[in-house]
Amino acid sequence: MRSIKVNLDKKSLSSYEICIGNSILDRMALLIAKNHKAGHHIVITDSNVGKLHGSKLLAALKDVGLNVDLIEFPAGEPAKNIHTVVDVAGRLLDLGADRNSLLIALGGGVVGDLVGFIASIFMRSIPYIQIPTTLLAQVDSSIGGKTAIDLPCGKNLLGTFYQPQAVFTDLSYLSSLTEEEFNNGLAEIIKYGIIDDAKMFRLLEDNMEPEKIKDPVLLLKLVELCCRIKKSIVEIDEKEQGLRRILNYGHTLGHALEAQSAFALSHGEAVALGMIAAARISENSGYLESGSRERIERLIRKAGLPCRIPEYLATGGIISRLKMDKKKDGDIIHFILLKKIGMPFVNGGIDEKIITPVIEGMR
Ligand SMILES: NC(=O)c1ccc[n+]([C@@H]2O[C@H](COP(=O)([O-])OP(=O)(O)OC[C@H]3O[C@@H](n4cnc5c(N)ncnc54)[C@H](O)[C@@H]3O)[C@@H](O)[C@H]2O)c1
């Protein structure tokens, strides 16, 4: 099992370990019992993950002597809302949860974001642990302490910065993912290559065939590389005052597309489209040479991710969503653009006139 320490400002209070390995359930349970003591451990998961992996985790935690319960909520992005928060909080109270309880988020990014949010506000905050079960959550959302729920008018508009006590990443969970969900995670892995690691981008270009990319040794290497990139960015800029914004490469337009499609487009698919749009804006504005833009599009296509914005998403609607983005300043929409692969920068503001033809060109 590999271990990566995330060192944050208030050191002993908010620093934590990311443990990564394959089939680490028993070791994980022992480590939780030893290092994360609490009167009551409550696993919160969604209906899909609960069915597949909930009872095994519960049994492993009971085996090491913990007082454990499980709460499930409906799977999928539409459940990442205030109604689920209120419902789960009520069920926590029914189970007798108090400030001596610890929450365990077992699931993908939706579970991690929602449980982190609840942990940050339940009885003015209680600790939580992340056990990410999608590739996307393992390389991205479980690390860094961004918690969130969606509002009807946009994604992640209510949220907090609240770090978990630990992250346990077990690659064996990935074997029950659908092809589509696996590919969603590849979108975030490609993102890390684009924003920070040209060598990893090349490694992905050489190994994106389905039979190669799922090789356990390669997968472990990629997950670890991504966790190291994210942790080093979060350590410098925990609250997204500057550097951390580069992690949003592809997400400005991605979030707008995801919300405008009423989540018919998954997060990974929307981010893939957003990454292509950002590369095209970078190229059209004279920052990025065309060879790099083409490499990005080729790799995204090879990963089974979309390269075309669906016709049913009207350009005007997408632009209105962009204007609601929480990272905008006044009417200025910030995009993360590229000088080259591995070298991003935060653009001071992109005009609607530049974005519109790029969206139209991706039909
Ligand atoms: N907090 C952050 O820093 C951050 C970063 C990136 C994305 N996100 C958020 O993450 C969410 C997307 O995450 P996601 O793609 O993991 O979505 P998700 O949590 O909805 O999971 C996708 C689907 O896979 C299922 N699933 C999860 N694990 C499984 C497993 N092991 N086997 C079979 N099925 C499984 C889920 O039930 C769900 O149906 C979005 O809400 C996004 O905003 C947050």
Image (cartoon, rainbow, N blue to C red):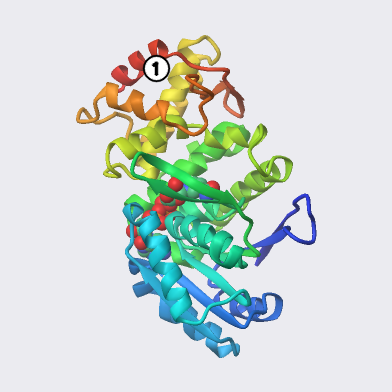
Left or right of residue 8: residue 324: left
In the image as oriented, which residue stretches furthest toward the front?
123
- The answer, for residue 176, to whether it is visible in the render is no
Where on the image, by quarter, is ligand 1? bottom left
- Foreground of the two, 139 or 101: 101
Using the image, determine if residue 78 lies above or below residue 124: above
- Foreground of the two, 206 or 308: 308
Residue 65, given in percent of the width and then of the height, sits at 60, 90
For the point 42% across and 72% down, which residue is it? 90
In the image as oriented, which residue stretches furthest toward the left?
312
Going by the numbered disc 1, the residue's amino acid type is Ile
For the point 40% across and 34% down, which residue is it? 254
Using the image, determine if residue 213 lies above or below residue 361: below
For the point 46% across and 35% down, which residue is it? 251
Label 1 within 8 A of ligand 1 by Cβ: no
Residue 240, given in percent of the width and then of the height, sits at 63, 38
Quick one: quadrant of the C terminus? top left
- Foreground of the two, 99 or 355: 99
Residue 258, given in percent of the width and then of the height, sits at 34, 39
Using the image, determine if residue 210 lies above or below residue 313: below
Residue 169, given in percent of the width and then of the height, sits at 56, 63
- The answer, for residue 83, to whether it is visible in the render is yes
Residue 38 found in image quarter: bottom right
Quick one: quadrant of the N terminus? bottom right
Using the image, determine if residue 109 lies above or below residue 363: below
Residue 348 found in image quarter: top right
Q: Residues within 10 Å of mark 1 (few under 14, many from 20)?
A: some
Left or right of residue 99: residue 294: left
Q: Which residue is mark 1?
A: 355
Residue 76 found in image quarter: bottom left
Secondary structure under the numbered disc 1 in the rendered image: helix
For the point 69% across and 40% down, which residue is it? 237
